[in-house]
Image (cartoon, rainbow, N blue to C red):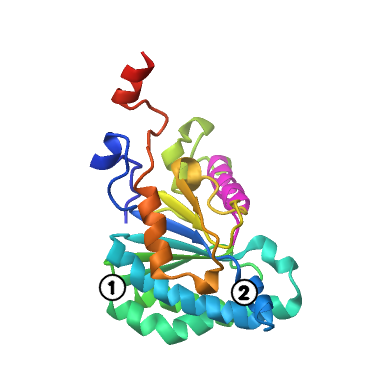
Amino acid sequence: MAVQENTPSKGEASGVAEAAPLHVAIVMDGNGRWAKRRGLPRSLGHRAGADTLKRIVEAAPKLNIRWLTVFGFSTENWSRPAAEVAELMALPKRYFETDLARLEREGVRVRVIGSTQGLSRDLIKICREAEARTAGNDAFFLNVAFNYGGKADIVEAARRFAEEVAAGRAVPGDLTEAGFESLLATAGSPPPDLIVRPSGEQRLSNFMLWEAAYAEFVFQDVLWPDYSADHLKAAVAEFQTRNRRYGAVVPDDALAAG
């Protein structure tokens, strides 16, 4: 799959993003607080969050979204209590065991992005199996960011290019933005048009730092296990009201300023 250019759509050319976002990225946040409010262990909040992911993956294509990237486990999450980390480590296995057949059948291509460092062999095997079984699909693209951090990904891309230079296969002047993007974990996906964070928090938390350069942000005050297709639809509707200029000036704005 070729890297997509960040080219404004027809609606965006006039300033307003009338079309649905091609790529939506979601920080799946609030599982622990959801469980705490119900007097439940945090582990049950994470399991409820996995069920929410199934609903949202089904809902996204109906909103004309073609790429969905979800943030499941960050490089910083290792600092959480061991029992919670173990539960988080089990989520991809639980998700793919219960939903992979449907994803495969419905044309969803799965890609797990992030570092394999610290992951068990079984977990890596399950993730690779999900990727292999859906590799030929192109109806919808699901990126699961697991053991992922935006800073770490940028550093890894820089290290890979430095190795090319050290081996004599490149010189520093060869590096371009497009070339650098091809070294990131998200290579092959267009940059996100819309980044959504439920739970009421308003920060990126080290998610898709390079790719977020011209993304629109929508923050919603709902915990991830309670997130629904209607919440996603509302986020898309908010996106469609935004004036996306990509650093340029929309002609009408220029006339008004003059």
Q: Residue 90 magenta-drawn? A: no
Depth check: 241 or 132 in front? 241
Assign a secondary structure to mark 1.
loop
Q: Which mark is residue 74?
A: none
Check disc 2: other Cα within 10 Å, few if <14, some if 14-19, many if 20+.
Answer: many
Measured along the vertical axis of the image, is residue 6 above or below residue 133? above
Seen in the image, is 216 located left or right of residue 4?
right
Seen in the image, is 19 located left or right of residue 168?
left
Q: Which mark is residue 34?
A: 2
Q: Earlier in the sequence, mark 1 or mark 2?
A: 2
The amino acid pointed to by label 1 is: Gly
Alpha carbons under labels 1 and 2: distance apart: 32 Å
Q: Residue at x 61, y 78 (%)?
A: 45
Most extreme residue toward the left, as rendered? 10
Depth check: 97 or 162 in front? 97
Measured along the vertical axis of the image, is residue 122 above or below residue 66? below
Q: Which residues are magenta?
A: 148-165
What residue is pinned by disc 1?
Answer: 107
The amino acid pointed to by label 2 is: Trp
Where does the image place residue 123, in percent across and percent down from the top left?
56, 79
Task: Quadrant for the C terminus, please.
Answer: top left
Asked whether the beta carbons under mark 1 and mark 2 sit within 8 Å of each other, the answer is no
**Mainly helix, strand or loop, the magenta region?**
helix
Q: Residue 151 magenta-drawn? A: yes
